[in-house]
Image (cartoon, grey):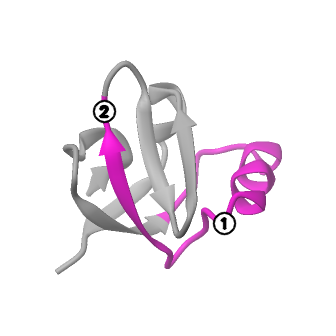
Amino acid sequence: MLTLADIKQDQSIRIVAMPELSESVRKHLHAYGLFTGRTIRVLSTRPEMTIQIEETELALEYSVARHILVEVSR
């Protein structure tokens, strides 16, 4: 299974699961609209992972992105 940290710039992906993130981190991400089933776009991968969730841009540390399981949207 791919993680968000594996995805290249300008790809759209769907969030599959976030099983290893703490409840507090998951709640924080939910507040920005990042949850299982959501399709997002990776805007950049350096210096940090930057994603777009609808109209919101969010920067994530790789330590978090490595624990978000995804699949590439078709």
Foreground: 4 or 19? 4
Q: Is residue 50 visible?
A: yes
Q: Could you tell me the amino acid type at mark 2? A: Thr
Q: Secondary structure at mark 1?
A: loop
Q: Is residue 66 visible?
A: no
Residue at image coords 69%, 53%: 29
Q: Residue furthest front?
A: 55
Q: Magenta segment: does it hold 1?
A: no
Residue at image coords 24%, 47%: 7
Q: Could you tell me the amino acid type at mark 1? A: Gly
Q: Which residues are magenta?
A: 17-45
Q: Within the image, what quadrant is residue 19 found in? A: bottom right
The numbered mark at residue 45 is: 2
Q: Is residue 34 left or right of residue 16?
A: right
Residue at image coords 44%, 67%: 15
Badge 1 or badge 2: first in the primary sequence: 1
Q: Are marks 1 and 2 in contact (CB under 8 Å)?
A: no
Foreground: 69 or 51? 51
The residue carrying mark 1 is 33
The numbered mark at residue 56 is: none
Residue 39: image location, x then y, percent: 42, 73
Q: Within the image, what quadrant is residue 31 found in? A: bottom right
Figure quadrant of the C terminus: bottom left
Is residue 3 shown above or below 54? above
